[in-house]
Each structure stands twice: as structure tokens, then as C-alpha cells.
């Protein structure tokens, strides 16, 4: 590339000299000379920048290798220089601290609280010891045993609700049960207050329609 530019520059210089001798378009020719000089300057600058970058990369690799070798000699007890010993000792401390932080992070991730269990029928969050869903009244242990494996990637999971009275599977957005005719109420927000089952005395979630322990309807509670 440099040879081509140089030959172009020399050839153009000869032509420009001839035009200059005749005194024609002198200013235009001077501009061409300047452009050729700028092109050559950029080419040389780019080459030097590439060489500098390559040298810096090699210097960094050698510096890292020198540091590792020095640290290895320190660990073998073959370095007694005060400043080098201090630096090597600090690097060893940092390595130990990094490993400790990694262990702390792994322990923290392992201690994450387990996901709140949900009813397999209506996906309502339930307590770990509940036997019946407080929203739809489904028996949690039975549903857990009958729940199929999770669908493969790309497949959709369809959740069907059941009638709280006769347990018939309801069509989507049903307002009434097609079997017994009971009205299906949409869940509504209730003020936070303590609610207890009238049959077994267990505390129920606010707005629950069934006891999570005995499965009795909430309508029988006071």
C-alpha cells in the first residue's frame, strides 16, 4: 500500500512541477500536494498506532507472567525483598478474601426461601400445612398427587376451575355451574381481619371460602 501511494505521489509531483513551470492552475496543484501529504501522514500514523497497541499487549502479558512467577517464588519462600514480599502477601490475602466471598455468595443463594406452595387447581397461594384450598375448596393432597408433570417448553398450561359445591369442572369465565346451578363468585378484596373456622377453630385467610384444615365451607363460620 505504501509503495502504491509513494509512486502516485512521485508521478503526480512530476506532473505538478511541469504545470508549475508553465504557471497554470498553481493553487489547485498545491492543494493536491497537500492532500497526498495528508494521506501519507495518516497511513504512517495508523501503522504506528497498530505497533504501539501490539507492544502494549505483549508488555501486559509479560507483566502478568512476571507477577505470577514472582508470587510463586514468594510462596516457596525464595523472595526476601521487603517491598516484593509485601505485595505478594497482599495478593495472597486478596485471593483468600475472594474465595471467602464466593463461598458466602453460594451459601446465601442456597439459603433462599422456598417458593410459596400454590393450589394446583386455581393457583392460589396456600400455607404449607393446609389440606384444602381456601379459595376453591380443592383437597390439596389429592390434587398434588393427580397433578401431571409440567408441560414441555413452548406448551401452554390450561387451568380449569371446579364448582365449590359439586366439584364440576367449569368452563372459562363461567358465572354459574352448569351442573348444579350455583353462582360462581369472583374473588373480591376483603378488609384484613381474623377469621376462624366454626368447625375446627383453625384460623382462615381473609376472604377464604373454605377452611384450609378441615375443608368445611366458610359460610358455616360466624
Image (tube, helix red, strand yellow):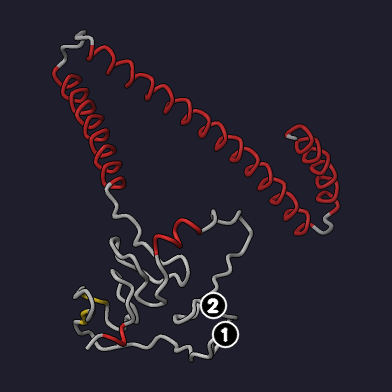
Q: Which residue is mark 2?
A: 168
Nearer the observer, 171 or 92:
171
Q: Position of residue 31 (x, y in %)?
A: 72, 55
Where residue 41 appears, x then y in whole percent? Answer: 63, 43
Name the disc covering residue 179, or none. 1
Instruction: Determine whether 53 is above or below 145 in the image.
Output: above
Q: Are marks 1 and 2 in contact (CB under 8 Å)?
A: yes
Label 2: how many Cα within 10 Å (few below 14, some 14–19, many 20+): some
Indicate the quadrant where residue 2 lies.
top right
Q: How many marks?
A: 2
SS at mark 1 in the image: loop
Which badge, 1 or 2, comes first in the chain's sequence? 2
Determine whether, in the image, residue 45 is placed left or right of residue 142.
Answer: right
Q: Residue at x 37, y 25 (%)?
A: 64
- Residue 218 to residue 58: above or below: below
154 sits left or right of 175 in the view = right
| In this view, 206 is above or below 17 | below
Where is residue 209? Give x, y as percent.
Answer: 34, 82
Residue 48, placed above or below residue 117: above
Quadrant that contains the N terminus: top right
Disc 1/disc 2 C-alpha distance (Å): 7 Å
Residue pictured at 83% horizontal, 39% vertical: 11
Q: Residue at x 55, y 38 (%)?
A: 49
Residue 106 in which image quadrant: top left
Q: Secondary structure at mark 2?
A: loop
Amino acid at each position: 500500500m505504501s509503495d502504491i501511494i509513494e509512486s502516485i505521489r512521485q508521478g503526480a509531483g512530476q506532473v505538478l512541477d511541469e504545470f508549475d513551470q508553465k504557471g497554470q492552475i498553481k493553487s489547485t496543484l498545491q492543494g493536491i500536494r497537500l492532500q497526498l501529504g495528508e494521506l501519507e501522514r495518516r497511513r504512517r500514523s495508523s501503522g504506528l498506532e497498530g505497533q504501539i497497541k501490539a507492544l502494549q499487549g505483549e508488555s501486559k502479558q509479560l507483566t502478568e507472567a512476571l507477577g505470577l512467577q514472582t508470587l510463586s517464588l514468594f510462596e516457596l519462600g525464595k523472595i526476601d525483598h521487603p517491598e516484593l514480599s509485601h505485595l505478594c502477601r497482599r495478593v495472597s490475602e486478596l485471593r483468600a478474601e475472594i474465595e471467602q466471598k464466593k463461598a458466602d455468595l453460594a451459601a446465601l443463594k442456597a439459603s433462599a426461601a422456598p417458593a410459596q406452595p400454590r393450589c394446583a387447581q386455581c393457583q392460589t397461594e396456600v400455607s404449607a400445612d393446609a389440606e384444602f384450598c381456601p379459595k376453591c375448596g380443592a383437597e390439596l393432597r389429592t390434587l398434588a398427587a393427580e397433578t401431571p408433570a409440567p408441560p414441555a417448553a413452548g406448551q401452554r398450561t390450561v387451568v380449569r376451575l371446579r364448582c365449590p359445591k359439586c366439584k364440576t369442572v367449569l368452563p372459562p369465565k363461567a358465572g354459574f355451574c352448569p351442573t348444579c346451578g350455583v353462582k360462581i363468585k369472583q374473588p373480591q378484596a376483603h378488609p384484613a381481619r381474623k377469621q376462624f373456622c366454626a368447625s375446627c377453630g383453625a384460623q382462615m385467610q381473609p376472604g377464604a371460602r373454605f377452611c384450609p384444615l378441615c375443608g368445611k365451607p366458610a359460610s358455616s363460620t360466624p
